[in-house]
Image (cartoon, helix red, strand yellow):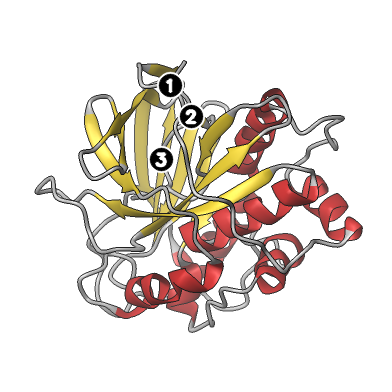
Amino acid sequence: MTTRPTAPVPSEPFTPAPGDVRAYLRRIDAERPDRADTEALRDLHLRHLRTVPFENLSIHLGEDIVLEEKALLDKVIGAHRGGFCYEVNTAFAVLLRGLGYRVSLLQARVFGPEGKPGIPYDHMALLVETADGERLLADVGFGDHSHFPLRYEDRGDQADPGGVFRLVDTAEGDVDVLRDGKPQYRVELQPRLLADFTAGAWYHRTSPDSHFPRSLVCSLLTEEGRITLSDRKLITRAGGEREERILEGDDEVRGAYRDLFGIELDALPVVRGGISDSNPR
């Protein structure tokens, strides 16, 4: 196996309190692992995807999106919310560091319909170093994606319940992440600080060229498939079957957020620019 170098992991000033780690593990229904190894990471990754939704509700509720570790922990743990990539991947990185993993924040550019990568800091992914010497590409913030972290050193096909994934080196030294042969995003392997993603988060919160301000999504992996609520449209995928239905009335929508995603809302999010995309990514 070829070892692929990366730059040193930058120092991170934030250290989670032991109580935050315990609360986070309760949030994702996980036990504290005995060792920060690959097996434990795979379990934590899957549990996170099944309990913390990929969602952009803050954009449409008029809430601030604060890229600060403690604020994101409070959102995921205290408010029982999720978020988009910068939020949930940062929170997951904090949890992993609190359990003894070494984690780098990586910037990525998502491939658009025309097959070209988007803006810098379009997306955040995580490079995780485990106690058993493996490096894995983890991502709990891309919506419908791999269920388990991908082996970073492996350049062959990696079978996953979410599809067949492959990491491909580019001529520029980056890595393309492919799903079922289709490029998903291009990762730059230089570790970054959380503050570096501020412009990307602002773009996806405000730009008409981003689908996030134009669409409303709350999506969660399930044992049977996936559930997604896009405005009032509830999409359920289970056993290879897809079902859509329109929810009637605000009470039913609030109930869906509460019962399916564990999110209690006083006011419902409103998309002011019109819905253009009901898919999680």
One can see residue 10 in this view: yes
> Closest to the observer: 68 or 154?
154
Label 2, on which residue? 150
What residue is shown at x 78% (from left), y 40% (from top)? Answer: 29
CA distance for labels 2 and 1: 8 Å
**Image x and y of residue 251, in percent:** 56, 66
Label 3, on which residue? 144
**Image x and y of residue 160, in percent:** 45, 21
What residue is shown at x 49% (from left), y 61% (from top)? Answer: 192
Label 3 crowd (10 A; few <14 / some 14-19 / many >=20):
some
Label 1, on which residue? 154
CA distance for labels 1 and 3: 22 Å
Work out whether mark 1 precedes mark 3 in sequence or the reverse, and give the earlier one. Answer: 3
Depicted 191 relative to depicted 48: above or below: below
> Closest to the observer: 55 or 93?
93
Depicted 154 relative to depicted 17: above or below: above
| Front label number (2 vs 1) | 1
Residue type, label 2: Leu
Residue type, label 1: Asp
228 sits left or right of 258 in the view? left
**Image x and y of residue 98, in percent:** 79, 51
